[in-house]
Amino acid sequence: MSKVKKTIVYWLLLLPLVVVILFPFGVMFVTAVRPRAELFVYPPRWTFSEFRWDNFVDMWVKTNFGGALINSLYVSVASTALALVLSIPAAYALSRYRFGGKGLYRNFLLVTQMMSPIVLVLGLFRLMVQFGLVNNLNSLVLTYAAFNMAFTIWMLQSYFNTIPRELEEAAWMDGANHFVSMTRIFLPLAVPAMVVTGLFTFINSWNEFVLALTMIRNQDQYTLPVQIFSQVAGRYQVEWHHVMAGTVLATVPVAIVFSWLQRFLIKGMALGAVK
């Protein structure tokens, strides 16, 4: 079978999956730009009379989308940075040193990945009350970083194992201490892994809803998932074109970050799979 025929066959096999994945985004976009009077036409159709780009402007003004966007960016970036700063030394220790309980600790990290944040939401809320961080975005930064650290440590440690020890040993022979060899030799080689791990941590923090709904009560402190939810919950009349416009814009930062870091993502996944 020629290469062109194989490509056609592969695309035909993948086409149902592509349709299933893109269909919700298509509905979301069409609803966002559709005139309000044509939202509930029956039978449903993809066509409409005009593109209403003003829906995005109206949504931005009426729903405090800009403030929620800034809150989500702050929480996601800060929690990702904090998780990486705390996880890199732990992953390096797991990769390079021998100590008692190492295997037990690795298993503990794996088990914590099976636990949903909703199981601990009441305890976390009471903890933040004691710290005086309820209605404070820093409570989300701390909790998101804590829940993502098990994932980041596990992922980074697996990649760190692929970096030859001989590179650090050569630096030690030249007089470098462990800290210098780690910061100048080891970490530059691990940039793809840190970018990949940071990307997934950012997405997890960006999309998290339950903890944000629990910790934040003031509408000015809402993150995007909670802000969009507030446009639906408890409303007598839901402005679906505004809801969908907000959802479309909420996907844009993640898409930009993913596209910007795509080369690191591919490189990190490929190198991390080869030992």
Image: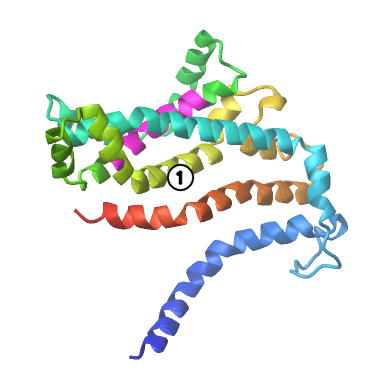
Quick check: 34 left or right of 80?
Answer: right
Q: Indicate the secondary structure of the residue bearing disc 1.
A: helix
Q: Residue at x 33, y 91 (%)?
A: 1
Most foreground residue, 185 or 228: 185
The magenta stretch spans residue 20: no
Classify 10 Å Cα crowding around label 1: few (below 14), some (14-19), many (20 and above): many
- Residue 105: percent from left, percent from top: 22, 29
Residue 237 quadrant: top right
Quick check: 253 left or right of 57?
Answer: left
- Residue 260: percent from left, percent from top: 52, 53
**Does residue 10 lie above or below 242 as drawn?**
below
Per the rendered image, the range of residues in magenta is: 141-156
- Residue 119: percent from left, percent from top: 43, 28
Q: How many marks?
A: 1
Question: Dot 1 corresponds to which residue?
Answer: 199
- Residue 203: percent from left, percent from top: 50, 43
Q: Residue at x 47, y 25 (%)?
A: 143
Residue kind at label 1, given as amino acid type: Leu
